[in-house]
Image: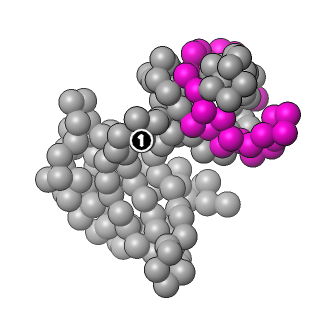
Amino acid sequence: MYEDLIRKIEKLAEEIAAYYGCYIVGIVFSSSSKGGGIILRVYADAEGGVNISQLTDISKELSMILDIEDLIDFKYTLEVSSPGVDRVLFKLNDYIKYRGSRIKILVKNKIGSRLNFIGKLIDVSGGEVNANINIKIFDEIENKILVIPFFNIKKANLMS
């Protein structure tokens, strides 16, 4: 729904984050539980971890640029934070980086009779196009290896 807008915001955020020695993990729009507004969540990190000062600086500068560029034509709240311990996996490189980790995956379309999977991220395989990429996990529920198409993943995150 907001894919093009997210790409534009991500490009701006990546330039700002790089200046502060950080990188953007991912960006999402979500509904606020308070008042029904929209939250723009920007997750930033740095090698060795991000600190509150970096997050504050990124937030201030990104907020100013978003206001100037007037990219978002609806009311929203900007939140810039670290991805945390149970970090969301956004990009293919996240899955590659966290091979061997315990993850939780929610899929768009059922695999068998299930939408949720928890297990150890074993491997990432396939081609250059998202439609050909597969995520291989050892599923804790069925105690077997499962292959999940990358394009079918709605949300995934590390589990502590």
Residue 29, position in %: x, y? 53, 62
Q: Is residue 114 left or right of residue 139?
A: right
98, above or below 79, in the image: above
Q: Amino acid at mark 1?
A: Asp
Residue at 78% in and 40% down: 114
Residue 91 or residue 15, whichever sits in front: 91
Q: How is the image coloured?
A: one colour
Q: Residue furthest bottom?
A: 35
Residue 15 or residue 58, whichever sits in front: 58
Q: Is residue 133 visible?
A: no
Q: Residue furthest right?
A: 112
Q: Is residue 73 visible?
A: yes
Residue 136, position in %: x, y? 65, 19
* Quarter of the rendering containing residue 92: top right
Residue 18, position in %: x, y? 27, 40
Q: How would you rate the neighbour count of disc 1 (Cα within 10 Å): few for under 14, some for 14-19, many for 20 or more?
A: some
- The stretch of residues the image draws in magenta is 104-131
Residue at 33% in and 57% down: 80
155, above or below 72, in the image: above
112, above or below 80, in the image: above
For label 1, the residue is: 86
* Quarter of the rendering containing residue 149: top right
Residue at 49% in and 84% down: 35
Residue 64, magenta (yes or no): no
Residue 93 or residue 109, whichever sits in front: 109
- Location of the N terminus (image quadrant): bottom right
Give the secondary structure at mark 1. Answer: loop
Q: Is residue 84 left or right of residue 155?
A: left
Residue 54, position in %: x, y? 18, 50
- Location of the C terminus (image quadrant): top left
Residue at 68% in and 41% down: 116
Q: Main secondary structure of the magenta part?
A: strand
